[in-house]
Amino acid sequence: MRCDFNQVGRTLLLLSALFTSPAVAEDLQRGKAWELHLIDQSSRGADGVKLADFDGDGLQDIATGWEEGNLTRVYRNPGPALAKQLWPAQTVGTTPQVEDAAWIDLNHDGRLEVVSCCEGKSQTIFVHWAPEHDPFQKQWQQEVLPASQGKMMWMFAVPAQIDQQPGLELVAGGKGKGAQIGWFQPGDNPRHLADYRWTSLSSAGWIMSLFALDMDGDGDQDLLTTDRKGKLRGCRWLENPGALAAATAANWKNHSVGGEDREVMFARVADLDQDGLQDILVVTRLPDELLWFRRLDQSGLKWDKRVIPFPANTGHGKGVAVGDMNLDGRPDVVFSCGSAEPPKSGMFWMSFSKSGSELKWETHEISGPRGIKYDRIELLDLDADGDLDVLSCEERDQKQGLGVFWYENPAR
């Protein structure tokens, strides 16, 4: 057989160019995708995971709203031995266009409720009251929070200590016309939802994240948010005016952290550089970047911004979490993406090391090309093998989406 050396040469040059291109070379260095374990894939549009030890067994349970499925579910963590199977689940309510489901002890009786924030035409927050016994088997009671109806498209909710009175209050934010950040002040009996009064703290554009934490070291809880659209977009925090004024102040003082020129998505608070101060990490979309706001002092007013671009062949920025993924004693950053049509990756993590005064970032694979629209991330050791696994949800893959799931960390 005659060998065409010119053709062989051209083939070798093509292969050399292919495998030395930056995008392909980077993909090869990221490693294999992690093993996927489904928690629930039975509905459509899983939109966010929120954690709480609902049944007091020391394990973190999950609340999730299914936006296209129009329902909210809770999942009992079955423990490490059974974590790789489908988890016991209970539908707690019918929630049209639900965007977020959050845990809170709303009536201060020591037992958690779930609240569902709904957008679209629904524009309602629903409260789901658990039965006294067997909450993962028996029907829950669902009620409308009247003060929420028709006010805005609700996007996110967190429990917070607003007025320094016993118990936590419900803080929520929305998007679109008339969007605000505020809280629901109960009447004398917090079980009577008709007595709740809405107090607005700030106007808003499109709330992606809400955190209740002390930003300025004065002992009360402020509100940190990422606002995706509008005049106040960016990462900012609202200063709690103190116990005497918290219940009556129309607007809390707004402090910008940064990102006003970006479409900011989910955020995470963590001490990434391990200097004893809590930094803020914000993912942005178009351009797809991580904004690392290094806290410079306790005031919450001084920040040093660093920008870390997304690696090639990934989707658009969505979520972020921080944890030691490779057990080297240093924090790493985990990312989730939207618009991650194959062959793009929808979940990956990045480690960093110092090279002189600069940081060198290295990308590692989690999902591979499976999954299109991922959401919030939580890191916890679900199989009790000593490393952090990645819990999340996805709503656009194939016909149903991956639903609620976790990726098994292969570090051990």
Image (cartoon, helix red, strand yellow):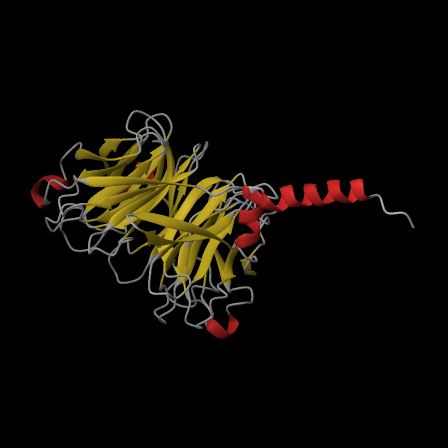
- Residue 108 coordinates in the image, percent (x, y): 24, 57
Of residues 125 and 188, the one nearer the viewer is 125
Q: Quick one: which residue is furthest to the left in this view?
A: 244
Of residues 327 and 1, the one nearer the viewer is 1
For the question of whether residue 240 can be seen, the reply is yes
Q: Quick one: which residue is furthest to the bottom in this view?
A: 81
Left or right placement of residue 19 versus residue 300 in this view:
right
Q: In the rendered view, tell whether residue 88 sits above or below residue 230.
A: below
Q: In the rendered view, tell whether residue 159 sits above or below residue 258.
A: below
Q: Quadrant of residue 195?
A: top left
Q: Quick one: which residue is furthest to the right in this view?
A: 1
Residue that appears at 44% across and 32% down: 286
Left or right placement of residue 403 versus residue 282 in this view:
right
- Residue 247 coordinates in the image, percent (x, y): 14, 40
For the question of whether residue 396 can be seen, the reply is no
Residue that appears at 54% across and 60% down: 34
Residue that appears at 16% across and 55% down: 166
Of residues 300 and 228, the one nearer the viewer is 300
Q: In the rendered view, tell whether residue 128 sits above or below residue 183.
A: below
Total residue callouts: 0
Of residues 382 and 1, the one nearer the viewer is 1
Q: In the rendered view, tell whether residue 13 sits above or below residue 349.
A: above
- Residue 158 coordinates in the image, percent (x, y): 30, 48
Left or right placement of residue 250 versus residue 375 in this view:
left
Residue that appears at 58% across and 42% down: 21
- Residue 360 coordinates in the image, percent (x, y): 38, 49
